[in-house]
Image (cartoon, rainbow, N blue to C red):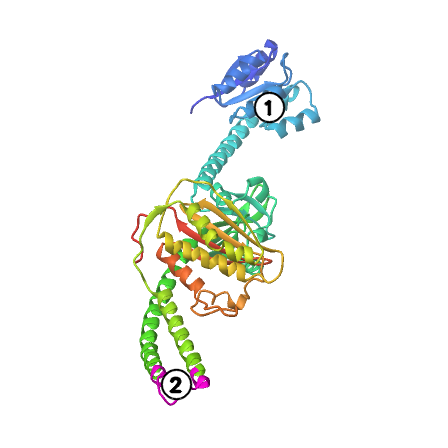
Amino acid sequence: MRQVRVLLIDDDEDDYILTKEVFDQTSASYELSWVNSYEKGIYAILKKQFDVYLVDYRLGKGTGIDLLNEAINSGCEEPIIILTGKGDLVIDEQAMNIGAADYLVKDEIDSSSLDRSIRYSIKEASATKALKDSERKYRAIFEQAKDPILVSDSSGRIYDINSAGLKFLDYERSVILQLNTSAIFNNTEEGERFRELMESNGSLSGFECELISSKSEVYCCSLSSFIQTDMVNVKEVYHTIIHDLSHRKNLEERSVSLGKMSISEHIAKGLGEEIRDPLSTINLALDELAADPAIICNETIQSYLEIIKSNCDRVNQLMQNFISSTETKTLNLQRHNILTVIEEAISDVEDLIVGHNIKLTRQFHQSEQKVLLDKPKIKNALVSVIKNAAEAMQSYPKIIHITCTADKGMYEIAIEDNGMGVDPKNKEKIFEPFFTTKKRASGLGLTHAQRVLTTHNGSIKLKQLAQGSLFLIRIPIYHEGTLWF
């Protein structure tokens, strides 16, 4: 059996001799060494030369408490036992609070009590070291995990969150630890349901919900959670792994959009053919009637014929617009500065902005990076969205705010108005052909804009505001993949 190396740190040689005599009476195998100063003692501790340290409270330059404090702060993991000439409850409590393994009174020490104290201290230090090692491993996994991980309890109190979670929810650690989990659930009902299922089942897997960041970004997520007892706080806590499903949802939405566009294009072309023939026949008949000698001089009939003809022309134009808005055309992709494209789109609607006395503000992220796009199509899409915002405002002051930022390989263009907003029941319909709540509007502008952005591997989404609406447009800064043509 290996000898236990013990170091006595005491400035009194007589105490060393007395302590050695006590060790000689023990049945265990100990190897006792001695240093007589604070400096030598702390040096030996920092060099990790011994298994146990016996430290006298009085050391001349400093106290045993000072040495204990310095050793603990320096990462000492070996047990330190404080020795005093006589008992002192205050010193006892102070030593134990700092991290002493035990506290012994010299006059009361015998071979049995000293042996027991050392054995228990070594065993406890070994258990503590194993616990700290386990905690360090857990902490390393916790912090290095790519998925966000949140630690909370049944009341919603947040105890911890890893770096990925802070980045995902865009919070500072000090801030989020002051919040309740209700602040990150976009829907209160989902937060309550999550807690109910955790309390009844003890664990969850694949719980889908919406989480919201500090910047009000909403993410579709899947939560996997289990309950564990926190030995520090003596409380059951939820360890929750957050899986971001936004990318998958975006792919699903894109797939649905492409499917809808394909169907719309097929219907539009078929409907166009069905309507074009009757319209041609009607127009031919109108021309024949207008040239009939019997009615050529009848101004009333001629005016009615003109009304019919103009409405036929309007139906024909409307159908052409519908076909054009659903038609898939090859993109002429070139690299352009997105800020230039936005400025040109704003310039194209300047008369509308001035005519409606609208205050248009902008906040752009300056960048020289180019975006691969079909400039005329993207500009027309932006014009459609800005016009939609302008027409949505009925009362003054009328304000449109446009921001442009770069985020995760995408340019985000936010077009915000302070109008009446979109009725929630109409939110899913606004990109459908011919859907409009405005008078004398074709209902094809947003349909066309969505189609253009989808073919650019981008997207357009509506976000409801307390007052007004915000259309968020995303365009890849550069995309190596094959675009949908």
Please tell me which residue is depicted at 32% across the width and 62% down the height of the picture: 328
- Quarter residue 315 falls in: bottom left
Q: Secondary structure at mark 1?
A: helix
Q: Is residue 107 left or right of residue 316?
A: right
Which residue carries the number 1 mark? 69
Few, some or many C-alpha atoms within 10 Å of disc 2 (few <14, some 14-19, many ≥20)? few
The span shown in magenta is 286-302
Which residue carries the number 2 mark? 296
Image quadrant where one finds the N terminus? top left
On the image, the x and y values in percent for residue 131 come to 49, 36
Q: Is residue 89 left or right of residue 98?
A: right
Please tell me which residue is depicted at 63% across the width and 58% down the height of the picture: 396
Q: Earlier in the sequence, mark 1 or mark 2?
A: 1
Few, some or many C-alpha atoms within 10 Å of disc 1 (few <14, some 14-19, many ≥20)? some
In front of the other: label 1 or label 2? 2
Give the answer, above or below, for where 7 lies relative to 168: above
On the image, the x and y values in percent for residue 343 come to 46, 48
Q: Is residue 477 visible?
A: yes
Q: Nearer the viewer, residue 60 or 456?
A: 456
Give the answer, above or below, for where 163 lies relative to 393: above
Please tell me which residue is depicted at 37% across the width and 44% down the height of the picture: 370
Q: Secondary structure at mark 2?
A: loop
